[in-house]
Image (tube, grey):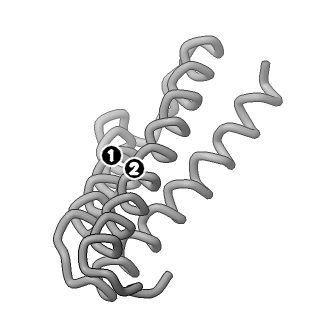
Amino acid sequence: MERWIVVLTFLGRLLGGGVILYGLTRFWLDRTMPPLLISLAVVVAGPVEDVLKNRLHRGVPVAVEPGVQLVDLATSAVFLLLLAFAIYAGGRAGWRREGKPRGL
């Protein structure tokens, strides 16, 4: 189970960074707010939440049951994938509506 926790932790960080960068890129190219808001939501639910939790626990790690941690990491990965698809679908919907590609 520990191996899955390591894999899902890495996957979550990779997906989170990817969603943030993709959302910011779509915002810059399309000049629409949803990709920016999704990127900001990921920043708040990821690194900002981690910093706040760390401050509350004064840097002392809190033991979390491995099964609970596994479920948390797996659902976070699925959540990030769905957000990435939302950014992608939003860009594609605008592309079809206007009849011209916007890039990416």
State left or right for residue 92 relative to residue 66: left
**Location of the N terminus (image quadrant):** top right
Q: Residue at x 50, y 56 (%)?
A: 16
x, y percent for residue 88: 43, 62
Single out the residue that lies furthest toward the left. 33
Q: Nearer the viewer, residue 16 or 54?
A: 16
Give SS at disc 2. helix
The three-letter amino acid code for the residue at tag 1 is Ala
State whether residue 22 is above or below residue 87: below
Mark 1, residue position: 45
Q: Nearer the viewer, residue 54 or 82?
A: 82
x, y percent for residue 54: 39, 42
Q: Residue at x 25, y 69 (%)?
A: 36
State left or right for residue 84 relative to residue 64: left
Q: Which mark is residue 58?
A: none
Give the alpha-carbon distance from disc 2 to disc 1, as whole Å. Answer: 12 Å
